Amino acid sequence: MAERSRGLPSQRQVTELLDGEFLRAGFDIEDVLIDASASPPKITVVADGDDGLDLDSVAQLARLASELLDGIDTSGGHETPDGATPAYVLEVTSPGVERPLTTEKHFRRARGRKVEMTLSDGSVLTGRLGQTQAGAVGLVRREGAHRGFTVHDIDLEKISKAVVQVEFSPPNPQELELSGQSGKEA
């Protein structure tokens, strides 16, 4: 495996090389995964932005990453038997729905999405994320006998786990309004 990974940049090198350019384009690098055992080896850059990551942005970031990565020599003088630098597959992607929300930035970017969160006291709440500010997030939940929606502010430090839920039905318009979304963004 060391033989194969010789020509690949390290996770740190990829992050340092791409971080400034991704930030200028309005995106953060959430993670870099390097799979040297794949054939061909694979570099995955996980990026996110305040407005998400659409297909045009993925294409733009992939072109940018490819140009920058192709410009560095990580072979240490080693080449493939045919004299070329080792090949790899580059993938730029957004964090999956399964990614836990762990930072204030994650909660802010997931605004309008349905989440399940476990609080530090062990209770589990499900609702739609509203605004995030001053270390707290609004959670829109259906409450009471009349089945209306209310917003509960929850301190981020009291959330031990939060994961976005996959939805198959459109959200209630009142619920979206309370979360700060018009229905087009969620």
Image (spheres, grey):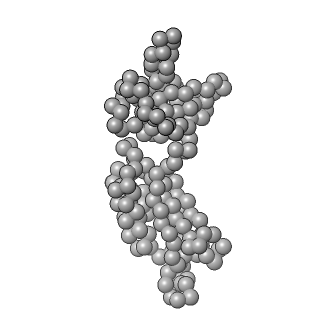
Q: Position of residue 96 (x, y in %)?
A: 51, 48
- For the residue pair 161 and 2, the one nearer the viewer reads as 161
In the current view of this chain or complex, which residue is farthest to the top?
A: 145
In the current view of this chain or complex, which residue is farthest to the bottom?
A: 82
Name the residue: 55% across, 44% down.
Answer: 99
Whether residue 164 can be seen here: no
Name the residue: 35% across, 33% down.
Answer: 183
Whether residue 59 can be seen here: yes
Q: Locate the C terminus and report the quarter of the image it occupies.
A: top left
Name the residue: 33% across, 31% down.
Answer: 182
Task: Tell me: residue 115, above or below residue 5.
Answer: above
116 left or right, relative to 57: right
Q: Position of residue 40 (x, y in %)?
A: 56, 73
In the current view of this chain or complex, which residue is farthest to the front?
A: 169
Task: Tell me: residue 66, above or below residue 111.
Answer: below
Task: Tell me: residue 54, above or below residue 103.
Answer: below
Q: Position of residue 34 (x, y in %)?
A: 56, 64
55 left or right, relative to 122: left
Q: Locate the N terminus and report the quarter of the image it occupies.
A: bottom right
Task: Tell me: residue 106, above or below residue 178.
Answer: below
- For the residue pair 142 and 29, the one nearer the viewer reads as 142
The mark tally for this picture is: 0
Q: Position of residue 154 (x, y in %)?
A: 51, 24
32 left or right, relative to 66: right
Name the residue: 55% across, 59% down.
Answer: 33
